[in-house]
Image: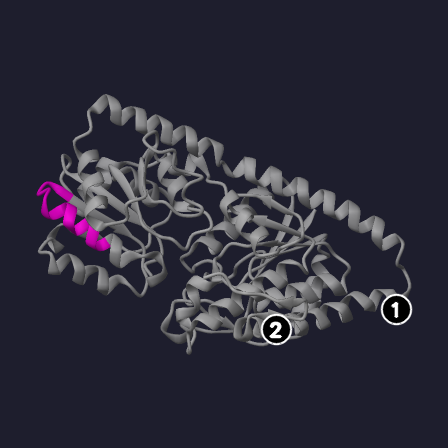
Amino acid sequence: MNILMMTNTYLPHVGGVARSVAAFSEQYRRMGHRVMVVAPEFEGMPEGEEHVVRIPAIQHFNGSDFSVVLPVSGFLSKTINGFKPDIIHSHHPFLIGSTALRIASLHHLPHVFTHHTLYEQYTHYVPGDSTPLKKFVIELATHYANLCDHIFAPSDSIARLLKQRQVTQAISTVPTGVELKKFQKGSGSGFRRIIGIPEDAFVVGHLGRLAQEKNLNYLAEAMSLFLKNHPHAYALIVGKGPSEIAIKNTFAREGVVDRLVMIGLLEGPMLASAYQAMDIFAFASHSETQGMVLTEAMAAGVPVVALDAPGVREVIHDRQNGQLLFNETTANFAKVLESFSHIPEKKLQQYQQMALATAEMFSIENSAKKALGIYQRLIHEDRKHRQENEDLWSGLLPLIETEWQLIKGYAESARMAIWGTSELGDTEWES
């Protein structure tokens, strides 16, 4: 089948959505399907990309590492007509997401939406961040989801949350799978030699986009506190983002910056080697819908210590493949890291084996098969429906309805955010 992926973030941007779109697209192609990705321009994007259509965009929106698409030009319609998609899959409810709705309506195609993000956790990138704005984006994302044919939730926690938020369309839990072989190659000891970490050091690692919504101030404080009390330990942080300087300042303030190693972005065997150089993976984000880096770490045989949060609790089986923390003080986080630094070798091997077993459950092959099964069912249902609606007017009606519903959604979301009421009656926002 021909699958059209539409996303506001894509490689080389560092983040879960970009990596998810890339992982699924590559796996679909391996399984014999055609995939086209529509995404914004990003700094450093490769030249001569195949199967990717780039939309002009404003770079570094409001000081972030995101880009914001400009109005979509006419060439996109010609490209899509040539591709002849069987299904549309959008990955954001805004910007390109709105375009995806229009394309699905215009071409009478089924439309799947993955609710990757807790959007209210990202409103600090927008001028005028406020509680009403957070409510607005929640309502808008919910309204968007209800305009699509099927919703993918990256975890069961998010599926339950979407139902609580009154998403009424069908929801399936489809996590982004991990490419197991990719993270089982590499050399942890070789990587340590390259970056100057002693072979016998205990290494606490973290990987991801280094940004405020990832709770990295907390994580840096917990890791530096552990290092202060454990002179043979190192912190290894892989990634880049606007929080890099703040992280370094935290370690410097605690007097352990000499044992902090920050090495930017890595790919391929070097990325796998970085994971394998870690003894434990540390994670503190509350904003995830799925902890992709957690399953990657586990695919490299690395146990995880993380705060209890949506998308995390589905991956960590407490005291089996890592530890889930409910006491969120930095002192407690440091204490748990300390306990892992003294764990007996036999017990550590049990944690590592359980981590590998967990990663197997989250393989990209399993996730792609589930997604493709849903695609095929939707396409079959949509074709039956189209056979019953062949005349021109009925062909235009879905597009007209979509435009009206988009406008209605913006208005209704604003009403709910400001007054807490909808045209269906009074609603009190939960505190």
Q: Is residue 333 above or below residue 99?
A: above
Q: Is residue 336 above or below residue 101?
A: above
Q: Is residue 379 above or below residue 395?
A: above
Question: Residue 41 appears at what percent x and percent y?
Answer: 49, 68
Question: Residue 357 appears at what percent x and percent y?
Answer: 42, 28
Residue 414 in sight in this render: yes
Number of the label disc, if any, that sits on residue 373: none
Disc 1 target residue: 393
Of 304 and 375, the residue lying toward us: 304
Q: Marks 2 and 1: in contact by CB < 8 Å?
A: no
Residue 53 in sight in this render: no
Q: Main secondary structure of the magenta part?
A: helix
Among the two numbered marks 1 and 2 on one chain, the one whose residue lies closer to the N terminus: 1
Q: Residue at (40%, 57%) from the top-left corner?
A: 14
Question: Residue 334 appears at what percent x and percent y?
Answer: 19, 44
- Numbered range of the magenta stretch: 220-233
Determine if the magenta segment contains residue 221: yes
Q: Secondary structure at mark 1?
A: helix
Disc 2 target residue: 410
For marks 1 and 2, give the CA distance: 26 Å
Specify few, some or many for label 2: CA neighbours under 10 Å numbering under 14, 14-19, or 20 or more.
some
Determine if the magenta segment contains residue 242: no
Amino acid type at circle 2 is Tyr
Amino acid type at circle 1 is Trp
**Protein image colouring:** one colour
Question: Residue 403 appears at what percent x and percent y?
Answer: 71, 72
